[in-house]
Every structure is written in structure tokens, then in C-alpha cells.
Amino acid sequence: MGYNEYAHTKHKINRLGFGGWQLGNTEFWGYMAIEDGVELVQHAIKRGINFFDTAPGYASGLSETILGMATKNLRSKVVINTKLGHTADGETDFSVYSLRKQIEDSLERLQTTYLDSVILHNPGFDILEGKTQHVQELKALKEEGLIRAFGVSIDTYEELDTVIHHLDVDVVEILFNIFFQEPAKLFKKAAKKGISLIAKVPLDSGWLTGKYDENSEFTGIRMRWDDQTIERRAQLVANLKEMTKEENLTKYAIAFILSFPEITAVIPGMRTIDQVNDHLANADFKLTQALKDQFIKLYETKIKDEPLPW
């Protein structure tokens, strides 16, 4: 599946990572028992996945707790990234003085003595522009050994451009998929700065699996889309199916992201063992240049000038 060095830590991570938002997250992603989440993570590790992304705000800390339970005896085999700024009790807190406490809380839930990386979870532009003391504090925590790398989780071209020009970080988690391609223009600049790039929301919350259409009914977090957005996404999905001649788009969506060599890893959310197995079965699938060009043209002609809402 391919491996890359991660965030100046000298650890190698597989390019197919594991997004942990769904672990225990009944409110947004449907019911998942704790023991099922533990089994899911351990199965992923057994199958070779070693990079796990989570956050305190995912299921009020339960995502971290499940990940900690699953990896406590396998810590040396995994690389764990979690986040700062949105706490397990639902508060938003980007204050510099709270970073240590937030990290210590995550360490407790994850049952570990160190974090491979922490990233500020969609911080404001004052932080991205380097106008605060966040980097200095995170460097100090890194020197103490509580964390081994740090960075930010962001969504847009403008945010990534700001980070590249103003912030000294090891890793950036960026919203990037077939429907959100604008940040790709900056990937080479980010790589030149030595930033590890992690692609988040790679399947557009399920649309890029090909399983949704204009008649689909949504629950949980997916209820955020209005009728117009659903109809537009459905048409774009139909366009992709015409291009690929297949109903299942998942392998094409992941392969598109990994066709950019600057992407260190991609982190699809996996809710079942079957989903883990399916992703791994297609981990080495390579997108043809012709299809990649068609996907880029779709974005340029039908999305770029009128960006989709997340």
C-alpha cells in the first residue's frame, strides 16, 4: 500500500490511514458498541494499517478511549494523531495555556505516555498567521516528549497558503477529494517545506463511494445538506460513474488522492471490518492519467467557480 515518513518523526506510516470520527459516534454515524470499535481498530492493525486519526471532540472523547483500549498493548505498532481546540465536553478552547491540559487529557483517554502528533482543529487565522504563541508552546511540549510532532487541521486553499507562508509545523490535515481540489495547487510548496499532508474527508462523507443519489435519505451529520446540494452532488456522482463505468467509486476516490505524491496519507472513516478489508483490497489500485485528467476537468468545469458546501 506504500509508506511515507511522517512529520519528521522518522516513523513510517502507510498511505492508507484510519479516520476515527466514527468510533463510538452514535450521534453522527450510527450505533457502534465500544467492543466493536476496539475489534475494528485491532483488525485494521492486524491487516497492516498503522496510522490512526482521532480527536477529543469525536463522540465526547469516546473515539480516543476506544483507540486507547485497542492499542494499549500495541503502542509501538501504531502512529496516533489527535487534535486540540475542541474538547471532549463540547467546549471550544484554543487558548495557549490550555494546550498542556488538553494533551494530558488525551494521553489519559488514549492510555499512552506520548502522542505521535497533535494538530490544532480548524484554528482561526490569527493562529495560522503565526500571530500567537501556539507554535512556541507546542515546541516546548515537543521538547518535553509529550508530543513528537504538531500541526493544524484546515479546509481551504487560503488556509493552506497562510500556513505555508507563516507557520512552522510538521503536519497539515487538509480537506481534499475529487469535489474539493483547490488545495492541490499548493501541495508542492507544502512538500518543499517538509510538511506531511494528510487528506481528510476523502469520500465526501460518503458521496464518493457512489452509494448516494438524489433519492437518498440522510441521518446524523449528513442531514446538513439541503435539497439543492443533494441534487447537485447526485449529478456529479452520476458524471463520475459515466467516466469510470462503475457504480462503486470508492477505489477511484482514494486512488485520485494518492495519485498526488505529496500526500503522505489519506484517512477514510471505516465503520466495519468489511470496509477495512475493501479499502485494503484496493490499496494498490492506481488511477490512470486519463481518468485523473477527467476528474480534474469535472472539478474545473462544474465545481471550481461554485464550490460545494462541505
Image (tube, rainbow, N blue to C red):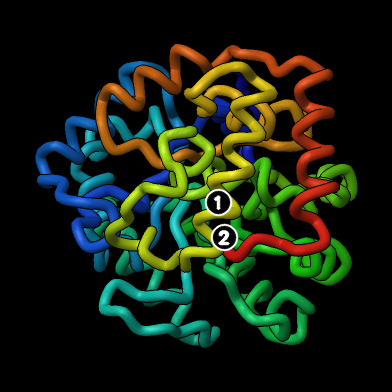
Instruction: Tell me where residue 179 appears, x and y as whole percent.
Output: 66, 47
Instruction: Tell me where residue 223 appears, x and y as whole percent.
Output: 36, 64
Q: Are marks 1 and 2 in contact (CB under 8 Å)?
A: yes
Label 1 – label 2 distance at C-alpha: 5 Å
Image check: 247 left or right of 101? right
Instruction: Tell me where residue 116 appears, x and y as whole percent.
Output: 49, 47
* Residue at image location 29% in from the left, 61% down from the top: 220
- Amino acid type at mark 2: Lys
Say if residue 245 shows up in the picture.
Answer: yes
Q: Quick one: 258 or 230, which is closer to the camera?
A: 230
- The earlier-in-sequence mark between 1 and 2 is 2
Quarter-wise, where is residue 249 in the image?
A: top right
Image check: 31 left or right of 134? left
Q: Quadrant of the N terminus?
A: top right
Residue, disc 1: 148
Q: Quadrant of the C terminus?
A: bottom right
- Amino acid type at mark 1: Arg
Q: Which mark is residue 266?
A: none
